[in-house]
Every structure is written in C-alpha cells, then in structure tokens.
Image: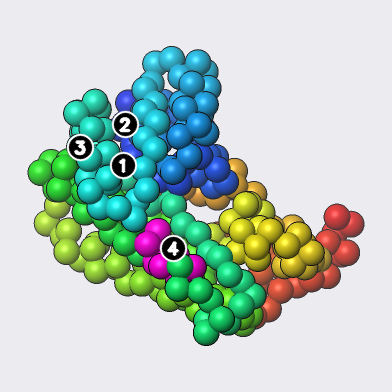
C-alpha cells in the first residue's frame, strides 16, 4: 500500500509560527508541499516563510498574519490564498490556546474566556467554513485535519481547564459531524489528539509560571512538537481511500488524564 505524496499539495496551516504548528510547517515543506502560514505574528511568519523558501525553493510559502476569531479577516485571507495557490488540498486546524490555569472557571476573566472561545471554537469554524466554501467543497476533495486534544475526551483532574476542555470536546463533536456531512465527497476529516507536549502552550496556560510548568511534567518526558508533527504527516499521507479518523498521541507515562507514571524517568535513567 503506497502512501499519498504531499509533494505539490497546497496546504493551509493555522497557528504556524510557534510550537506544533512551526514543526508541522517544516515537515510539510520537507515533503514538498506549498503552505499558507496563518498566525497573528507577522514578524515570525515573514521570517519563517523566508527561511522555508530559501531551503525549499520549489515550493511556495505565503505568510498570512490574521486573527482567526475575526471572520471577515479569515474570509479575506483564504480568498487571497486561493487566488495565489489556485486551490487548497489540505487544511490543518492547529491554532489553539489555553489561559488562566489553575484558576477555576468562576475566577477567570471574561476576556480570558472570550479569547479561548474565539480561537478554539470560532476560529476553528471560521477557517473551516472559508476553506470549504472557497475551495474544497466546489472541488469535492481535500483533507481537513483538526489538531484537538486528549482533553476533549476526558475531564482534566486539575482546575483551570473548564473552558479549554469544553472547547476541545466541541472540536471532537464538530469533527465527527463534519465528517458525516461531507459524505458523498472525497473530503476526509481527521483528528489528531496530542497529550502533554513541551511547548509555549503549557507555559501560557499557567501564566508563564515555570514552577507550575515543570511540576506538570515532573517525572516523565512530554511529547516534542516534532513528534506531533510526524503524526500529522502520517495521517495526511494515508492513501485517499483510507482515513485514520483519529489518532491519540501521548507520552507512554501519560496513561490517562488522571494517571501519570511519574517514576518513568527514574526507571529509565532520564
């Protein structure tokens, strides 16, 4: 069984400037894909596009600074991408954030709640809506990959996760419903659910309190962004007649959201 090549494919990637998104951008470029790089950080995107263009001159990389919680901005951006690429073959919903932990829900500020909902829910739906209407649905083909989280399936045992957990549970429901709605087309809808990953994301969720950050990973090795990116590439490279509908990728010591083997490093001399 041969895998599907990403060479020459046109990809839209959200949250492309840091963490998992940055790693996915590099992996896609290595595979020969052209990538529209979406993020809020114009400077980081411009630097990334310049770096990728120098390393992979046969592909195109478009930096798109956009706030995905603003539908008008999203629609304008995706329209521009389609004008430049001609079509969108792959869409990766990677942008996401959590903030305010370990404060319980009632102690969060309304701006914190709105920010998480705006990116994790509205942003996910706005970008998907634009990509489908501007390219994929007319062509009746493509692949949508939503980077969700294992927290969408299990309730986190620690405070500060009510909004983020609800966001990720919604993403799971949206992914499943969208997959059904697109029956009769050649559009695949997939989910990748990372567990604990050592990125800026976890630092942000605890307000960059590095003591809390290190406590979260005590006794085991979290995933790296590159490991998650490799899993994303694996899902995308499955031949068109196959859908690995959902993949959970976690550190082996992360047995569930309530059980962490914090003696793992000790047993493995890490």
Q: Residues within 10 Å of mark 4 (few under 14, many from 20)?
A: some
To which quarter of the image does residue 156 belong? bottom right
Q: Is residue 150 left or right of residue 262?
A: left
To which quarter of the image does residue 61 belong? top left
Residue sitting farthest toward the bottom? 106
* Mark closest to the chain's N terminus, 2 or 4: 2
Could you tell me if the residues under marks 3 and 4 are in contact, i.e. CB atoms within 8 Å?
A: no
Could you tell me if the residues under marks 2 and 1 are in contact, i.e. CB atoms within 8 Å?
A: yes
* Mark closest to the chain's N terminus, 2 or 1: 2
Q: Which residues are magenta?
A: 112-120
Residue 116 included in the magenta stretch of the image: yes
Could you tell me if the residues under marks 1 and 4 are in contact, i.e. CB atoms within 8 Å?
A: no
Q: Which residue is mark 1?
A: 90
Q: Which residue is mark 3?
A: 79
Q: Nearer the viewer, residue 18 or 237?
A: 18
Could you tell me if the residues under marks 3 and 1 are in contact, i.e. CB atoms within 8 Å?
A: no
Could you tell me if the residues under marks 2 and 4 are in contact, i.e. CB atoms within 8 Å?
A: no
- The relative height of residue 141 versus residue 149 in the rendered view (above or below) is above
* Mark closest to the chain's N terminus, 3 or 4: 3
Q: Which residue is mark 2?
A: 9
- The relative height of residue 167 versus residue 118 in the rendered view (above or below) is below
The image shows residue 154 at horizontal and vertical percentages of 51, 78
How many numbered badges does the structure rendering display?
Answer: 4
* Mark closest to the chain's N terminus, 1 or 4: 1
Residue 218 included in the magenta stretch of the image: no
* 3 or 4: mark nearer the eye: 4
Q: Which residue is mark 4?
A: 115
Quarter of the C terminus within the rendering: bottom right
Indicate the secondary structure of the residue bearing disc 4: helix
């Amino acid at each position: 069984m041969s895998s599907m090549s990403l060479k020459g494919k046109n990809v839209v990637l959200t949250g492309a400037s840091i963490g998992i998104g940055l790693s996915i951008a590099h992996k896609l470029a290595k595979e020969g894909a052209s990538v529209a790089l979406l993020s809020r950080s114009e400077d980081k995107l411009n630097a990334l596009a310049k770096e990728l263009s120098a390393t992979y001159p046969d592909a195109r990389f478009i930096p798109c600074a956009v706030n995905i919680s603003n539908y008008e901005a999203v629609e304008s951006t995706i329209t521009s991408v389609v004008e430049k690429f001609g079509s969108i073959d792959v869409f990766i919903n990677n942008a996401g954030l959590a903030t305010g932990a370990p404060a319980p829900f009632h102690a969060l500020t309304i701006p914190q709640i709105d920010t998480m909902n705006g990116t994790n829910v509205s942003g996910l739906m706005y970008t998907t809506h634009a990509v489908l209407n501007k390219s994929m649905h007319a062509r009746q083909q493509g692949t949508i990959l939503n980077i969700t989280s294992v927290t969408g399936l299990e309730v986190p045992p620690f405070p500060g996760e009510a909004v983020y957990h609800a966001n990720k549970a919604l993403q799971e429901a949206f992914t499943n419903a969208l997959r059904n709605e697109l029956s009769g087309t050649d559009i695949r809808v997939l989910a990748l659910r990372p567990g604990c990953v050592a990125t800026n994301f976890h630092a942000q969720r605890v307000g960059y309190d590095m003591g809390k950050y290190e406590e979260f990973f005590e006794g085991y090795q979290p995933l790296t962004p590159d490991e998650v990116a490799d899993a994303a590439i694996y899902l995308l490279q499955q031949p068109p007649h196959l859908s690995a509908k959902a993949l959970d990728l976690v550190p082996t010591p992360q047995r569930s959201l309530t059980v962490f083997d914090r003696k793992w490093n000790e047993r493995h001399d890490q």
